[in-house]
Amino acid sequence: MMIVPQFKNLQKVRCGVLTVEIEHVDAATLEKLEQQGVDCQPKASTIRIIQDKYLQKVHFSRHSIPLPKFMQIDDLNSAKQAGVLFNYPLMIKSKRLAYDGRGNAVANSEEELSSAVDALGGYDRGLYVEKWAPFVKELSVIVVRGRDNSVVCYPVVETIHRENICHIVKSPADVSWKIMKLATDVAFRAVSSLEGAGVFAVELFLTADGQILLNEVAPRPHNSGHHTIESCYTSQYEQHLRAVVGLPLGDPSMKAPAAIMYNILGEDEGEPGFLLAHQLIGRALGIPGASVHWYDKPEMRKQRKMGHITIVGPSVGVVKARLRSMLREETVDGETAVLPRVGIIMGSDSDLPVMKDAAKILREFDVPTEVRIVSAHRTPEYMVSYASSAWKRGIQVIIAGAGGAAHLPGMVAALTPLPVIGVPVRASTLDGLDSLLSIVQMPRGVPVATVAINNATNAGLLAVRILGVRDLNLQTRMAQYLEDRRDEVLAKGEKLEEGGWEDYLNSQR
Ligand SMILES: Nc1cncn1[C@@H]1O[C@H](COP(=O)(O)O)[C@@H](O)[C@H]1O
């Protein structure tokens, strides 16, 4: 096939590499090539996906994969005569060269439908019409199939579009585990119903009633997989090559807990556009975990994809905050507010003299922390909103202290998937035994790691150890902390041995 001479020896592999090349051929060149008798519609069905989305959809519906309702339209009048009722809004799509908002149009009325058909180049262009899918989120799953039919799926990501162009990709998607499983299942089945080795990006709609609909399949490395370069053990590009040449597929899982990919879209034409993009890149270079990819396209146009920036970090909240800082949103006096990783909460300000010890430890380890008064009995609504939003805000561990009928740690643990450490605070009666039992006696299924009465220091240290599981720096500092404590005790022992117990006690007075 002439279009992709550099991949001649891969011709027998029906793979996405060929389609990438085809997609990069613009409409005029394609036409010219066709006139010269070049076969621009190769036989491999993976390639037909781009050439003929209608065929692709028919193919999928046979495999009962959930799709938005669609039909091919050759002529509006004959469709109407045949009794087809259009429910607006509708999505009109061109079967060829429809990408990045091109070749698509939305029609909200019959008049808009005819103008949309005209705008897309008329019926001869090959159009089909789709019922507007009322999605709440757009998701994408990169599925890879090797030549030996082995398949791996990358984590489900959420794609956020600006004027129909992918703008931001969040990995992992902010959806429930159940939706992740469903999305992966639909993507897997969609790719299983196609032929070919390589990377397939499966774009999906999540509807308000929790359904996953298949939108499109791009049989190639995809914008929704760019983040994998930095955030996954095997990038989509390496994976694609492994797949098409027949090597074992790599590990698709994330090596960073969270990533956000931000497309650098042209903000303006020409020089002013370059200037804005370079300012953004300048800020990105100062953001921890950010990697800049500049495509070096010679011309700058509004909304053109000029490059992308991937930000990785220890939590979704942290990468979101880094993105906001890069975009100059939510900054205080030009400085980004550092996002807390630990939340220390307590039932009353009377608990603060005890709970401050946890805050001191976290400060010693440079762990950003927030301290709040949250009472399970006096401010129950606040407790619910605090506990249920904490993990989305980037909090990774909650330390909750309370005295008496100390229900706070347990109730918070019931409302969050984060680890909760309970601190029984000794109130004025019962020596804190009441708090200890209220916190430690949790029912099966909702654990609270309970420390000793009034021992908020241990709560702080335990939080550091939990964070240390994915933070080598903290883990090393914790090892140092233990060594320092050991040396302290050994020094005391030496002093006691040298001077005797009386001197030792006198020196302490
Ligand atoms: N269990 C509970 C619910 N709301 C506050 N408390 C606890 O009641 C004790 C006494 O609170 P105060 O000093 O405000 O009366 C504090 O230890 C506080 O955590």
Image (cartoon, grey):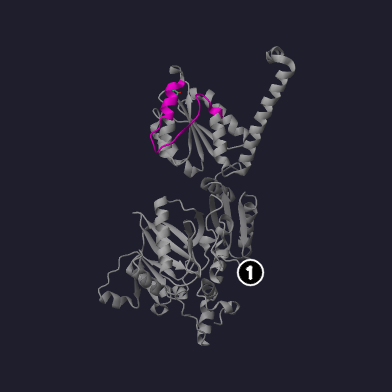
Residue drawn at (64%, 59%) of the image: 275
Badge 1 residue CB within 8 Å of ligand 1: no
Q: Quadrant of the C terminus?
A: top right
Q: Quadrant of ligand 1?
A: top left
Q: Is residue 41 left or right of residue 312?
A: left
Q: Position of residue 84 (x, y in %)?
A: 27, 72
Considering only vertical position in the picture, is 320 above or below 149? above
Can residue 469 be seen? yes
Considering only vertical position in the picture, is 86 above or below 174? below
- How many dots with numbers? 1
Can residue 340 be seen? no
Q: Is residue 178 left or right of residue 392?
A: left
Residue reaching furthest right? 498
Q: Nearer the viewer, residue 333 or 39?
A: 39
Residue drawn at (47%, 53%) of the image: 173
The residue under label 1 is: 298
Q: Quadrant of the N terminus?
A: bottom right
Quadrant of the image occupied by residue 273 = bottom right
Q: Position of residue 347 (x, y in %)?
A: 45, 27
Q: Position of residue 95 (x, y in %)?
A: 42, 74
Q: Magenta includes 280?
A: no
Residue drawn at (42%, 78%) of the image: 125
Q: Secondary structure at mark 1?
A: loop
Quadrant of the image occupied by residue 466 = top right
Q: Please, what is the three-letter code of the amino acid marked with disc 1?
A: Pro
Range drawn in magenta: 432-457
Residue reaching furthest bottom? 36
Considering only vertical position in the picture, is 115 above or below 413? below
Residue drawn at (44%, 38%) of the image: 387
Pointer 1: residues within 10 angstroms few (<14), some, or many (20+)? few
Q: Nearer the viewer, residue 452 or 184?
A: 452
